[in-house]
Amino acid sequence: MKHDVPRSLSRWVRRVGPDQAFLGLAELMSTTLPDGTGAFAVDADRNVVWWSQGAEDLLGFAADEILGSHCLKANRCPQCMSGCGVGEHGRVEDVRLVMVGAHGAEVVVRKSGVAFYEADGTFAGTVEVLVPDGATERPKPPPPRPTWTESAVHFHGLVTVDTGMRQAFEVLRNVAETDATVLVRGESGTGKELMARALHAESHRSGGPFRAVNCAALTPALLESELFGHVKGAFTGAVKERKGLFEQAHGGTLFLDEVAELPLDLQSKLLRVLQERVVVPVGGSRVVQVDLRVVGATHRALREEVKAGRFREDLLYRLRVVPIYLPPLRDRRGDVDLLLWHFIDQHNQRGPRRVRAVEPAAMRRLLDHDWPGNVRELMNVVQYAFAVGRGPGLGLLDLPPEFREMPGATTTPAPVPGLDEASRIAEALRQSHGHIGDAAALLGMSRPTFWRKRKKHGI
């Protein structure tokens, strides 16, 4: 293939190096072509000089066993043995071929390719792309999924197979039939507000309003006004009367998140609401009757807060008529896999990326993580993976940087004192059990860069 090359492009290619330019373009191409696409390049003797990860996945041959070999070793294609036509015609487009993969199975593809020539017209090689043919009957293995997905409990947006969570759901269903005040305790990100919303949805108040406020997010003065409302002129800026959340939630449910952060003076006012079901707006004298259920939530042990003098004991007993505890994600390891696929499915429906499998190394890191941010953190990790990654497989490179560190390391890449580049590459391969993509991720390299350095050191 011959084109007039702009001088600016020639200068740039000389500066970055032809191999770097090609590998960079190839890496970009591998993330934008249809799922399952493979690509490779051959030299003038039709020996393979580049073999993409997609080609490995499509035909089952690893790059190590194909590079330097004649292309027919990988293709094993009857049509190709009689000549594929790329060298003769300069290019082929969307030619249907039946190839034989590493395990003897037929692989039907659509091949496109372009040839390159020396200045004197001598054939110099080709770059070819293989796209799986939609007409192929080759069975596709099902994506790895939790084997117990069918036994999972789905409850108003909460998903689990954990016994502790199931028990919490059962308690919530029972208490929903009453007007008892509920206190949900759990770490940040465990789903406390979802539980409050589930309680509201299960109760006879489901047709009424649901209101929520984070007691730690507002100053005491603003929080009092938010909860109880105010009359016109109660303070600077109060230009008109405003109903508070207790009134707004009349006939429904009010969720008080981080209720342990309430100042003591507001605790006494909340106690009166729970006892007498009345509120007095800030700056007013009118008593307003309210009918609602209050659901509190906290990540603190309220008994310890009472002992420390930061929380009223009488309010504690009024709030925790029915206590519900949500265990952290690190104590319900079975839910990590389940929730991971739950969030993946949600993103798959939105597109454009469709994840069908999670690479073993990535899954190991996810299962070994302590999840200090619980379910919310896992949800954010999946969102990150869909934002930065491409293709049907979710791998280490798709995870946030902290997941790509070597075990016991504090930074990425993780240098080992006294080890040169070759030794670090060998160590990364050892820790990733020979998986090229995972080893590259451990060292903070792209796959092409890792493969080139590995070849340089003869590893």
Image (spheres, grey):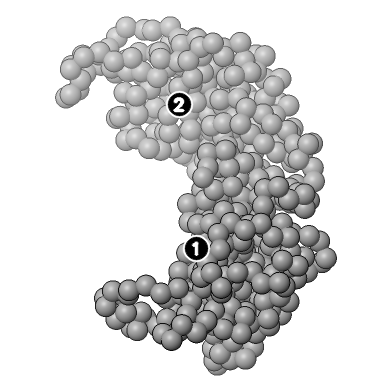
Query: Residue 52 or 71: which is nearer the viewer?
Result: 71
Residue closer to the observer: 141 or 309? 141
Badge 1 or badge 2: first in the primary sequence: 1
**Residue denoted by label 1:** 29
Q: Quadrant of residue 43?
A: bottom right
Find disc 2 in the rendering and name its residue: 212
From the viewer's side, name the closer residue of 372 and 383. 383
Residue at point 28%, 74% (across, down): 6
Residue 92 placement, left or right of 230: right
| Quadrant of the image containing the C terminus | bottom right
Residue 282 % position (x, y): 29, 18
Q: Nearer the viewer, residue 278 or 238?
A: 238
Q: Residues within 10 Å of mark 2 (few under 14, many from 20)?
A: some
In the figure, 200 relative to 402: above or below? above
Q: Residue at x 56, y 12 (%)?
A: 205
Kind of residue at disc 2: Ala
In space, the residues marked 1 and 2 are separated at their CA atoms by 47 Å
Residue 92 is drawn in which quadrant? bottom right
- Asked whether residue 113 is in view, the answer is yes
Query: Does residue 106 lie above or below 283 as drawn?
Result: below
- Residue occupying the far right of the picture: 104
